[in-house]
Image (spheres, rainbow, N blue to C red):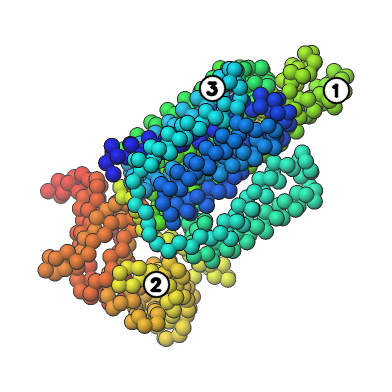
Amino acid sequence: MTHRQIMKAFSGLLLALLVAMLSSTIVSNALPTIIRDLHGSQSQYTWVVTATLLTSTATTPIWGKLSDLFSKKLLYQLAIVIFTVGSALGGISGSMPELIAYRALQGVGLGGLQALIQVVIAAMIAPRDRGKYSGYTGAVFAVATVSGPLIGGLIVDSPLGWRWCFWVCVPIAVIAFVVLGRTLKLPVLKRKVRIDWLGATLLVGGVALLLIWVSLAGTSFGWASWSSVAYVGGAVVSLALALFVESRAAEPVVPLRLFRNRTFTLSVLGSLAVGTAMFGGSVFLGQYYQISRGFSPTHAGLMTLPLVLGLALASTSAGQVISRTGRTKPFMVAGGASLLAGLFLLSTVDHTTDLTLMGGYLALVGIGLGFLMQNLVLVVQNTVAMKDMGASSSVVTFFRSLGGAAGVSALGAVLSAHVATNITNSFSRLGIPAGGAVHGGGGTLDIGSLPVALQPVVRAAFGDATGTVFLFAAVIAVVTFLAVLLMKEVPLRRTLDADSAPAVVEIQAGDGNVTTSLRGRVLDADGRPVSGVVLTLTDASGRQVDVGRTGRTGEYSLSADAEGHHVLLATAGSLRPSVSTVHLAERPVWHDLLLDGTGGFTGRVRTAGRHAAVPGAILTVTDSAGAVVASSLTGGDGTYSLTGLPAGSYTLTVSAYDHEPHSELLPVTTGAALRHDVVLEPEGEFARHTGTLN
């Protein structure tokens, strides 16, 4: 797609994203008014937010997996329709249970919108160019975050009333639906579809039970009670069964093999605190400014401007720089530190905190979110193949939403408990019975119904308890900072797809010593993985050392108790057996096999000195007559595979952007793929070395 075509389709995506984010932020400043009109309680206050987060969190991986199987465009439009219906119904709610139910329906559509936008972008734009478009996405997050509370406050303060906070999103959603229908043109993958409904059901059930327990424990029942045991036990059993099913399903909702990727696993962990800060901040800041400081909904929305401006500037500037340099880790480390510092500083606030100082704290949190939010998804998309793009992107978004849902629920319970304690202590010092007042301030949130003399006490109780909420969020942010700090940076590739090979791991023997390990893949003539291949490893004396079988992806893993030369035999039904000699040493060995009587090369292309992978490098193989017999591109981690070559000598030529070209003569043996890594000099280095030699 050209830049013009991308921007046309991107406008529809951004409109849908704007609607999704507005639905969350526009309600935050209206919630105190909604709760008062519908006679809600503190637990129902958090459930209005939690219901949406729960259903969006639970359905996000399902939307992502479906996008790997069906039309991404059709699914995105379906998500818009579900979300729009939920918004329209939310505006006619007559009670708190009704509103919570309609917000849950909104969440189903929201899960699709926030998961699928990353997948659709990945299907249109290569990772190296995706940074600047991610900057636009971050800007929309910022606009929705800043305009949402402000618009919500204006609507609540106007004659329209709070119900229009839900209805105002409907026309924007309809426009997004029409724009996407006309501009988004993506190829639909035609293949046999097998949906893992059992795994999806178990996953949704386990997550739902866990979030409901976090929301109700401490209020409806004790943390240490039989109800807690039932909820937690049910969640553990459901999630354990989900893991079992996912490990054996042909098309798992959450492919467990993705967690072998270190970058993917660390991004998942890092997303937890980002979700807690993003969702928890908007919910509890609106409550703090209105209840503790006595601001109107409109004024409360304006007070969050520092957070939003920091997020907007950070995401857009980082996106532009990342597109030029291909580097993400410096921004993520800076974002993790900024988020951590901002949340720890916010943990010091009370009902008398200087608002200018608090604005600086919010700006730090916004900068941290801007550097982290989109880049955590981007680094994952850069290291996985297109066939896993939907599942991987949605899992990262899933854990971000999980952090938000669990964070809002847990932090809401913490806030409610601390408010009640603060009110009780304050009234006890004044010699006033606290029972009814605690209910009025910590239960219904209708402070206006209290006597005028008591209102400052309750407002102070809310303000002083808010700092504790951000302290808990800061502790979680430590995990995000450590995750991005330990993440290994892989330069962003310039191609849409990648073929990521699994990492080689060491195997521990029973006595604690590291044994020699052998891993690899078995491929057919077309370079496709072959499952069910029996592999036998023998030593130099003919003694059988280990036996294994390839899995669905053609991978195998064997081990030996001694170093030296070994013989590896691979047999698979009607295919010609393959026999090769491997030399096992102290370090793990990677050895690919071909079951067609031909050979080839596999390996990794990296930059000299820095050992950084080179994605998108072009490899060509020429025979002795100078004819090109094979070609390939490196994946996101710099790996390549060139197979199906008859035995003989070939010239391998490698070229890549910003690197000097490389060429060398390599032998090909029958039945084995030569493991060969290529080291490229950065552009300019070769000329400088040549000048020195002359």
Q: Which mark is residue 150?
A: 3
**Callout 3, which amino acid?**
Leu
Image location of residue 157, percent across then percent down: 60, 18
Q: Looking at the rendered structure, which numbered label has been put on residue 530?
A: 2
Disc 3 to disc 1, C-alpha distance: 38 Å
Q: CA distance from mark 2 to mark 3?
A: 58 Å
Q: Residue at x 54, y 33 (%)?
A: 23
Q: Earlier in the sequence, mark 2 or mark 1?
A: 1
What secondary structure is marked by label 2?
A: loop
Of circles 3 and 1, which is in front? 3
Which quadrant of the view contains residue 462?
top right
Residue 73 in view of the camera = yes
Above or below residue 490? Residue 278 is: above
Q: Sort mark 2 into few (<14), some (14-19) or many (20+) by Cα contacts within 10 Å.
A: many
* Residue at the disc numbered 1: 428
Say which amino acid is labelled 1.
Answer: Ser
Q: Give the residue at x 43% y 64%.
A: 192
Q: Is residue 677 left or right of residue 335?
A: left
Where residue 478 appears, as percent x and y from the top left, is: 57, 40
Left or right: 64, with 297 as reference point: left
At label 2, which amino acid type do we have? Val
Image coords of residue 389 (percent x, y): 42, 52
Query: How many neighbours does mark 3 have within 10 angstroms: few (below 14), some (14-19), or many (20 or more)?
Result: many
Q: Is the Cβ of the residue at disc 2 closer than 8 Å to that at disc 1?
A: no
- Return the x and y of residue 403 as percentages of the image width and height: 59, 42
Q: CA distance from mark 2 to mark 1?
A: 74 Å
Which one is nearer the viewer's eye here, 50 or 472? 50
- Residue furthest toward the top? 453
Q: Nearer the viewer, mark 2 or mark 3?
A: 3
Viewed as shown, does residue 16 lie left or right of 220?
A: left
